[in-house]
Amino acid sequence: MFGRKKWLAAGAAAGALVVTAGATAFAAGGWTVTTVTGTSGNNVELTGVFARTSTDAWAVGEQFAPAGQAPPPPVTYHWNGTAWSPVSTPALGVSGALLAVSASSATDAWAVGFELSGRRAHTTLLEHWSGTAWSVDTADAISGDTAVELSGVVDLSAGNAYAVGLDNSGALLEHWNGTAWSPVTLPDPDFTPGSGEAIAASSASDIWVVGSSLNTTTDATIAEALHFNGSTWTVVPMAQPGTNTPTISAVTALSPTNAWAAGDDIGATSPVGGGTLLEHWNGTSWSVVPSPTPGADDSLTGIAARSASDVVAVGSALPSVNGGPLQAVILRWNGTAWSNDTGGTIPGWLTAASTFPGAAQEWAVGNSSGSAGQILSHP
């Protein structure tokens, strides 16, 4: 259900969350790590991040308790320009996770994910930030027997937001009009959104959702994007990397003529186990841009742009084709080429990234080990 996102095994006690600043800068890349852990050994996984301003950013995820204990609620952390602080969310009574977050103002943010109340009982999770507290929107939740979840969200204003994910029949796209969430009919019934940051917008009339579709002639999986121009959703073909099998997981949009999508590519012309895949939109078409593949079995699930010459893509890889513990992968676009910006070995994996035009910092989140979340920052 969760694609290539990495998930922790349950088995840690619930408790009050704390943020420990493990300020370890990796010289080559200049990234600094803040470790997020819980008291009593609470396991924490961070899966979404969104920076609105230099003093207003959110990171969201999940925490785990051992069998027999009440499931702890999902986690959210807020950046105020100086430090990350935990912000409580409502108790759900069941296992749940927040996978993505987006904000249009200091008093309007949406976080989305799922609730798992039984072996086959899944419900979408929608939580809203009012400026003082998180609340659960139960009226617009969607339940089902299989993979029902929301994995991405873009909040454009208090009366305009979109969330993307999966329901029992396939892709799920929901629109918020300021009063309620309602389904959006997609132009391709075979479309499946990516497992990472699959939705992004540069404005209310320039919204992208990326993922894959099925070529009914060849039965091959193909990379595909959906675009909204303010009035209509349309299918926009993406570049297909030869005969390989592409996975497009994440997208970021700077303008109607500048967007990036990230994922991985497995096939005859890719490195053993698969390689990174990055595609660029120039206003007319998507094209594959060469990118390095550090390690083996690389997977990119997050991407964010600060300018046309400063874009980061994040994910994970194995140290070699012989295996080993997962390591974070960070690639950077400097306006000319993609390069490895990890700056050394960062244990664990990264799931999402965020920044904004002219931002003082870039952010990435993920997990550093079997129990601790991590928030990375770059000036």
Image: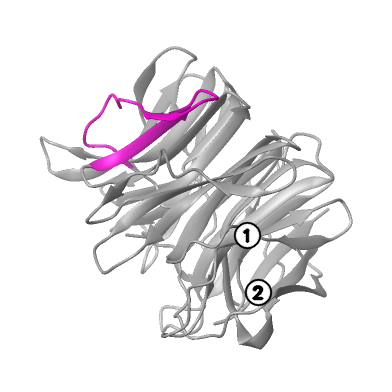
**Magenta stretch?**
170-192
Give amino acid for label 1: Ile
The residue under the point 46% across, 43% down is: 198
Do residues under tags 2 and 1 come within 8 Å of each other at their CB atoms?
A: yes
Q: Which residue is mark 2?
A: 346
Residue 119 falls in which quadrant of the image? bottom left
> Tell me, what colour scheme is on the image?
one colour
Nearer-the-camera pick, 347 or 309? 347
Q: Which residue is mark 1?
A: 330
Vertical relation: 190 (above or below) 75: above
**Gap in Å between the C-alphas at discs 2 and 1?**
10 Å
The kind of secondary structure element at disc 1 is strand
Q: Residues within 10 Å of mark 1 (few under 14, many from 20)?
A: many
Residue 196 appears anywhere in the view: no
Q: Residue furthest top?
A: 231
The kind of secondary structure element at disc 2 is loop
- As drawn, is 188 to the left or to the right of 57? left
Vertical relation: 11 (above or below) 183: below
